[in-house]
Amino acid sequence: MIIDDLDAIAEAERSSAKKTVIRCCMAAGCMSSHSEAVKTSLEKIVRDSGLSERIEVRGVGCMRLCCQGPLVGVDPDGIIYEKVTPEDAPAVIIATQGGEANVKRGDPTHPFYTKQLSIVLANSGLIDPERIESYIAVDGYRALHAVLREMTPNDVVESAIKSGLRGRGGAGYSTGLKWATVAKTPAAQKYVVCNADEGDPGAFMDRSVLESDPHSVLEGMAIAAYAVGANQGYIYVRAEYPLAIKRLQIAIKQARQTGLLGSGIFESPFSFTVDIRIGAGAYVCGEETALMASIEGRRGTPRPRPPFPAESGLWGCPTLINNVETFANIPVIIRKGAEWFASIGTGLSKGTKVFALAGKIENTGLIEVPMGTPLRQIVEEMGGGAPGGVKIKAVQTGGPSGGCIPASELDTPVDYESLTRLGSIMGSGGMIVMDESTRMPEIARFFMEFCMDESCGKCIPCRTGTVQMHRLLDKIVRREATPEDLAKLEELCDMVARTSLCGLGQNAPNPILSTLRFFRNEYLELLQAQPDGKPAPAGANAT
Amino acid sequence: MDRLRIATVWLGGCSGCHMSFLDLDEFLIDLAGLVDLVYSPVIDVKEYPENVDVCLIEGAVCNRDNLEMLHTVRRRTKVLVSFGDCAVTGNVPAIRNQLGAGNDVNVLQCAYIANAQNNPRLPVADGIVPELLKRVKPLHEVVPVEVYLPGCPPSADRIKLLLERVLAGLPPALEGEQIRFG
Amino acid sequence: MAAKTLIIDGKQVSAQDDATILDAATDAGIKIPTLCHLGGVYDVGACRLCLVEVAGAKKLFSACTTRVAEGMEVHTDTERLRKYRRMTLELLFAERNHVCSVCVSNGKCELQTLAWQNGMEHVGYDYSFPRWGVDATHHLFGLDHNRCVLCQRCVRVCWHIEGAGTKNVAGRGARSAIIDDLKQPWGDSETCTSCGKCVLACPTGALFNKGSTVGEMSRDLNKLEYIVNARLKKQWIALE
């Protein structure tokens, strides 16, 4: 494989393009509402009516507005059809020949679409994720070529640093610095790992990226491997994502056959292979040391850091672990330049972030916006607010490790620092909207139950502290708790946060702490009178 | 100064803690000179009196009788001492809690029917045989407790140490190996 | 090997540069409470009792897994640490069924000792009273899950001293449990060599010699260290 071969593939793909392309969303959301039948039906009609020369029916990745699926897009007309059934297929095809289909039309001029800025999702919903040619036609693997032929590993690390990209998996550590550490650690063997163990309730960003554009992740991993000096990569993906696994397998196979993975890529000395490791459903395996233990075939439990994986990771070798979205940013940063990337976003949070909108919100789906976009713009303008015109009460970000941001703080720009200041975290990008009917102590109990079930059981504070916190929250929700119980709960929050071994335990109290911070009254109202008959005083919470 | 009014109470326990109390031997005579023992299984008083200064309570809260008694004691006493492991932790009486829901019925069945040598039947006498609670609890899960005196049983030395501190007007907290369970 | 100097609880201490804070403190006669630590096998930092404060750092460090650093200033016995340790112990006691009075290890139990040493005279959390069984299928030993604290000392000695790999952990969170082979009855295990090292390593009464009754289980941890020294340092004869 040399660059001319890549050009040839791209050219062949572009020149075979047909006049009309009907894009059918084939990501997990739309497929669960039978988009596959829609696609089959469209294909059949195109074939039967002899339009195969003029119309291509293409299975694509996520088209964002999941709640209106199955989604079908028609190019170049710029039409989006929503909730399409197989019976709608004839009307859709007829409309491509002029006329109007009596099928529910989406509004491409809605802020949900227009306020998005796509870097990671640029190809999502456009290309066929199961064909490498489709990716190559949109400049796929050009960044890898540029890196291998024109840049030293150090240049690549410098680019990553300059771009200001920070880890999209949750903690927000500088990607470039992480790469630099791995690159500088001398070792004969190094590894690159993609963390695709997305497990937060309501989060489906990484799944969508893998289902919609798997090659961008592979390319990002290959570039990272070149930068840090690794020749083997692993993608750790949860078993609950069978479609993502299937598309990754196809992508890896095609990349290997095309010579974009394997030895001597682009006739350089660089070799890189990628293998998939499938998780067995443990949330804690998203924690990097537990993830590595699982890849090694051991029980997935975290271990104390240091040593960090960058120094001693898989089998004791220096290991770079980044999240799916982080890797997907890399090819674009290389192609368009670190300066371009750094011009997007805010002071310390560069680029865009993909969010999965879920919960009590009109437009459930996937969005990608520049860092620093106000929360209000995301949930009200783009998300369309809560259904039925009910007021939004809070937005939960960061999953079980995050917190609830009250409606009064909706003007907060979404970046790492601002969310941390509000007691939440950016996390991986799950955003659960809650309306006025939501009772916050119940939300806290829900997340604590999640943490309790998903604790690995290794360290005492997390294993047993979450049980006791859940019990106290349950007591509060059942109106059986006293002010002493609330004090005990807050004491446990502090203790579990400070003494747990890994991030799961350290952040488990966050949903309680953030709801207590902004909605303390809801807890106080549920407290029982004290034993002596006095009602719970307003300040009874302070220990 | 008025003499301290002291009581001891026996809830769901084996009476071993009270045996240990009797093991105070000659200190009991010193004690008798310094305090009034106003209620105890070892003296013949039927009703728990008002205005008790210190009460040592042996045993866990196992039945309705225990529960009512504990609330009465709490209302009428300044300093409650959880006396022995059953009072402090639930100990052996609380092992039945492991059987989960229905454990109260279960233990009765086991004791009076399944393992009965002859004449198997459940003791039923309203107002005389108290109903078992669904869950055995240590004292502090029911009422606030001021002092904990663990041990199964707490040794006489340990009890003496505590009483001496009480008599001297010191905070009655024990420390070091004096708070060892078991 | 180079030495590092550091300050532990106001005391100047020197330690080998690969020593942990726990090693350095122990050498200096400063006692840090531990439960999952066991001399002779690697540390896992699971029990969190040995957490210490390091000046200038916001987070707490497990002394058993953190290496000493030059000029490090360590505090092992602050009010906050004492509070966390007591809470950790209370949480443990509330987790399973630790009934000291009827336990084979009564009076010789590390958990029981830690409790009084750390001022725990009662447990402030509601007891869980879970239902766990006893595995009495092995002809020499028994495993009472009610008394297990999941320190994994038995697992580590089984894998790394005996090399049998019989013991392991299964399940998650509060449902985690020590298992033999693929969660079989211990007596059916084909890998267990009946060496008894797991029983020696157990800090509580969870693993015991069959036939021992209340307070009868005593364990000689020096035996384990002796084996490790014999292997690693080639010290075949116990030195004075």
Image: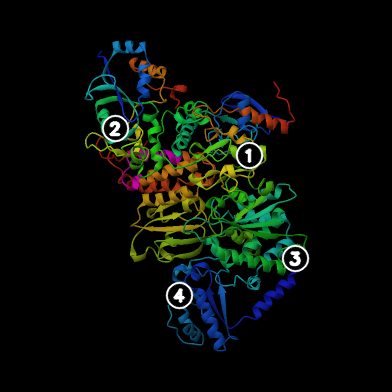
Q: Position of residue A158 (x, y in %)?
A: 67, 54
Q: Both on one chain, marks 4 and 1?
A: no
Dominant SS of magenta comes to helix
Q: Nearer the viewer, mark 4 or mark 2?
A: 2
Would residue A245 be visible to someone looking at this image? Answer: yes
Amino acid type at mark 2: Asn
Q: Which residue is mark 4?
A: A82
* Dot 2 and dot 1 residues touching (CB under 8 Å): no
State the CA–CA distance, disc 4 to disc 2.
Answer: 67 Å
Nearer-the-camera pick, A40 or A259: A40
Separation (CA) of disc 4 from disc 1: 60 Å
Q: Which residue is mark 1?
A: C158
Q: Nearer the viewer, residue C210 or C1?
A: C210
Q: Which of the 4 quarters of the picture holds residue B178? A: top left
Q: Image check: A312 left or right of C101?
A: right
Task: Tell whether A119 sits left or right of A414.
Answer: right
Q: Residues within 10 Å of mark 1 (few under 14, many from 20)?
A: many
Of discs 3 and 2, which sits in the foreground? 2
Q: Chain of mark 2?
A: B
- Does label 1 lie on the same chain as label 2? no
Q: Amino acid at mark 1?
A: Cys
State yes or no: residue B92 in magenta. Answer: no
Residue bearing mark 3: A266
